[in-house]
Amino acid sequence: MKVPLIIDSNERGPLKDAVVRAAERQGIPVKQEFLQGIGDYKAGDGHIECKSISDLFQSTYSGHLMRQMENLDANCQRVFLVIHGDLAKYVKIANNQGRKTTYSKSLNTLTGIIARIMADFDCHVWRANNYSEAAMFITKLHSKLHTSASSHGAKAITRVSTNDIRADMLLAVPGFGQDLVEKLLERCGSIEEMLHVESVKQVKGMGSVLRQRLIEVLTSEEPVKVERKYNKRREKI
């Protein structure tokens, strides 16, 4: 039996309708439940927040977006941000409403917001031109998170060795990328300091799930296992 795509009970409007239609076409069941303010959709261990370009700009200026991202980062295993909308159309509407702007200025703002989010948080960002593209991504992501990986020729996930054994050790922990490890080492300075939760809390882009995982890896006397969904079976794309 297929795992349902979870839609927040507060989600309304054309994007939600497009997601339901896309899920039906792919044979994915949907279920609505309250997600407690951590995303609009839930696909496996991934929480998906969706913003139109207009909403993205407004919530950025008000500070609400960064509060949302901090909450998602602190409480979710994996975070995805879907930004949908035609930028040219946004510029036209904004100018008609008296909010004078240009395409290049709006593109610069949009790119800056995306870069800021990806630099500060462990978040994947997808930009879609319309509701249909956004819905297709959300349902495809749900499907991929619940099926085995394709046979892409890679026998194992490997990381490039650095000149710092501390960094190599941390990069072996699932969820820890190069940027996060560099921030962690810069803030804490030593592996020993990472045992102190208050020190680790100061690292941007590191939520409670990753903090708990790090502490467990550094202190557990038993094997620490994190489920991975990879095998050699080819998947139809």
Image: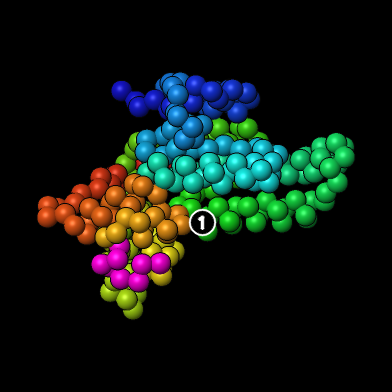
Residue 219 placement: quadrant: bottom left
Residue placed furthest toward the bottom: 163
Residue count near mark 1 (Cα–Cα under 10 Å), binned few <14, some 14–19, many ≥20? some
Residue 131: x and y, percent?
A: 63, 32
Residue shown at the point (31%, 41%) measured from the top left: 148
Q: What secondary structure do most residues of the magenta stretch adopt?
A: helix
Q: Is residue 193 magenta?
A: yes
| 193 over 62 or under it: above or below | below
Residue type, label 1: Asp
Task: Magenta stretch: give its range.
Answer: 187-194
| 214 over 233 or under it: above or below | below
**According to the image, label 1 marks what residue?**
120
Residue 165: x and y, percent?
A: 28, 74
Residue 235 placement: quadrant: top left
- In this view, the residue in front, 14 or 232, is 14
In what quadrant of the picture does the N terminus appear? top left
